[in-house]
Amino acid sequence: MSRLMTLLVLAAMACAQQPYSKLPRNYTLAFENDSVRISRVKYSPGDKLPVHSHPSIPTVYVYLTDGGPIRFIHKTPQVTIVRDAVKAGQVRFNRNARVETHETEYLGAAASEYLRVELKTTPGPPHIDTRLVDDADFPWEDPQLRISRFHGVPPALARPAILVNLATGSFLWIDPQDSRAPARPHEPGWFVLLELKTGRATPAP
């Protein structure tokens, strides 16, 4: 990869740090390695978040609770959209072609929480946003990622993955090739599984 492209990627990753310093009550960095960055995001009724940015890399949203609508006031391009209410266990995968800079207004009557999973691995071809709502929508995959949702015992894994326990709102980074990573649990539960099908897109800085 060219030096220019590497610098652009690093600049985009720097933009992603903005929410942690500007909005610590809403954004918490929960985990980061060479493949993913996972943020825990919380909204309370009446929250209005000032302008902040997110990088132009593929991002998965795993909704841990039911959540009300959110109004996004985008700055570039200037457009306002409202994300509909969501239910716990739903997943959205934003293939994301540009840095997002926006304000947000939470319109729900009850608190909401989700995981924001930014993928540093090599993306597949561009595609529209994917919204996985019902059991029939799972599993879903593209060249970069496979997303499953299930009740039961997590399967044996051949690839690095993020296992989200929807009942507890917790998650594990699991890497079968890394003895330091946690082993998959053997107890049944309600899970979302994100399996990474490609390696890191750029060398670690």
Image (tube, helix red, strand yellow):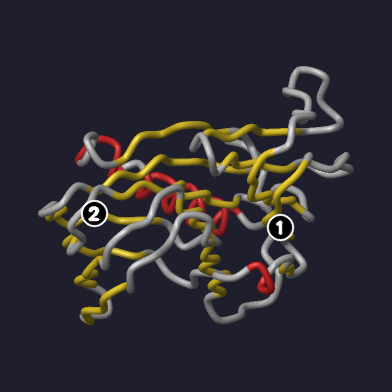
The image shows residue 73 at horizontal and vertical percentages of 19, 71
| Residue 52 marker | 2
Q: In this view, does 82 lie above or below 16?
A: below
Q: Name the residue under label 1.
A: 148
The image shows residue 142 at horizontal and vertical percentages of 74, 70
Residue at 18% x, 57% y: name it.
109
Q: Residues within 10 Å of mark 2 (few under 14, many from 20)?
A: many
Please tell me how many numbered marks the rendered image carries: 2
The quarter of the rendered structure image containing the C terminus is top right
| Badge 2 amino acid | His
Mark 1 secondary-structure assignment: strand
Mark 2 secondary-structure assignment: strand
Q: Is residue 159 above or below residue 61?
A: above
Q: How crowded is mark 1: few (under 14 residues within 10 Å), some or many (20 or more)?
A: some
Gap in angstroms between the C-alphas marked 1 and 2: 30 Å
* Residue 104 visible in the current orientation: no
The image shows residue 187 at horizontal and vertical percentages of 75, 30
Q: Which of marks 1 and 2 is nearer the N terminus?
A: 2
Q: Which image quarter: residue 83?
A: bottom left
Q: Nearer the viewer, residue 53 or 175?
A: 175
Q: Is residue 166 left or right of residue 27?
A: right
Q: Which image quarter: residue 186?
A: top right
Q: Nearer the viewer, residue 27 or 88?
A: 88
